[in-house]
Image: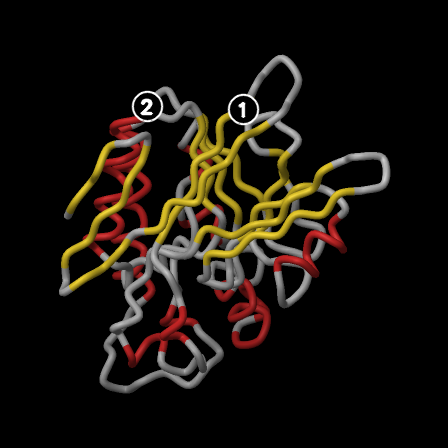
């Protein structure tokens, strides 16, 4: 699940993703970071017309995490902290250093009360294996392009952050294959007051990803699912089945 940016997510796209997930019943759910936007504690200039309190944002985020627990109670779940969730820690360090350590993203999202969840902190060394496979995940890519990321990573890597769907393969002289890819995002770019500060945001694509893992050897097979949006209607295809909003 790529960048959602709750509560500024694309509601139809997010619900379509959940419909697909309910259909395939995943054994593992991986959030690639920026599930929350944390607009209220952003260091960027904020639109005064957008009234946003951290408490209100958290209500929507917690509701989303609770829904995932209700829909997929037996699935293992991994939450990669993104740079947007890290806005809270950065805000405390810059604006209220005396309170740093009193609370955190991990604490506010109640991960200590979610037994099936693993929380992975944001940082330059962030990395986690996907469902025990040879595919790793982190929030940010290692280079501006998928090709650059695959070259630098020297391992297979899925990442979020860029809000685009892209992929690159490299093959070593020994025949070893590495793939680096991202699967888009689930935010709503029509919210110009929230995302308009990023040049080129019109290029962001709605989507999510599926990974099938062979537990006998750790090999994985992945699929980038692009959610098409035409005249306000959304659709995608998974395993030959068409899903529509």
142 or 118: nearer the viewer: 142
Q: Would you name the residue on which mark 2 appears?
A: 73
Estimate how packed mark 2 is, as few (under 14), some (14 to 19) or many (20 or more) residues with alpha carbons within 10 Å. few
Q: Position of residue 140 (x, y in %)?
A: 59, 58
Horizontal relation, residue 214 to residue 37: left or right:
right
**In this view, which residue lies farthest toward the top?**
216
Up the image or down, 77 lies above or below 139; here it is above
The residue under the point 29% across, 81% down is 193
The residue under the point 53% across, 40% down is 119
- State the SS at label 2: loop
The residue under the point 26% across, 29% down is 22
- Of badges 1 and 2, nearer the viewer stands 1
Horizontal relation, residue 147 to residue 90: left or right:
right
41 or 28: nearer the viewer: 28
Calculate the distance from the C-alpha at mark 1 to the C-alpha at mark 2: 20 Å
Q: Quadrant of the N terminus?
A: top left
- Residue 213's disc is 1
> How many discs mark residues in the rendered view?
2
């Amino acid at each position: 699940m790529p960048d959602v940016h709750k509560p500024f997510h694309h509601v139809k796209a997010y619900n379509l993703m959940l419909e697909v997930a309910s259909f395939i019943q995943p054994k593992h759910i991986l959030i690639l970071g920026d599930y929350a936007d944390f607009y209220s504690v952003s260091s960027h200039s904020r639109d005064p017309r957008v009234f946003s309190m951290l408490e209100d944002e958290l209500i929507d985020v917690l509701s989303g995490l609770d829904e995932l627990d209700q829909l997929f109670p037996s699935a293992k779940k991994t939450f990669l902290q993104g740079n947007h969730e890290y806005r809270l820690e950065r805000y405390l360090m810059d604006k209220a250093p005396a309170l740093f350590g009193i609370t955190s993203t991990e604490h506010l999202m109640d991960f200590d009360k979610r037994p099936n969840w693993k929380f992975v902190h944001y940082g330059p060394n962030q990395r986690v294996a996907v469902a025990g496979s040879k595919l790793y995940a982190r929030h940010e890519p290692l280079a501006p392009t998928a090709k650059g990321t695959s070259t630098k990573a020297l391992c297979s890597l899925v990442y979020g952050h860029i809000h685009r769907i892209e992929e690159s393969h490299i093959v070593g002289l020994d025949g070893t294959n590495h793939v680096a890819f991202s699967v888009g995002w689930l935010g709503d770019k029509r919210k110009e007051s929230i995302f308009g500060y990023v040049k080129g945001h019109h290029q962001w694509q709605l989507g999510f990803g599926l990974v099938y893992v062979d537990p006998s050897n750790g090999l994985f097979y992945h699929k980038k699912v692009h959610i098409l949006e035409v005249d306000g209607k959304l659709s995608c295809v998974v395993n030959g089945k068409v899903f529509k909003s």
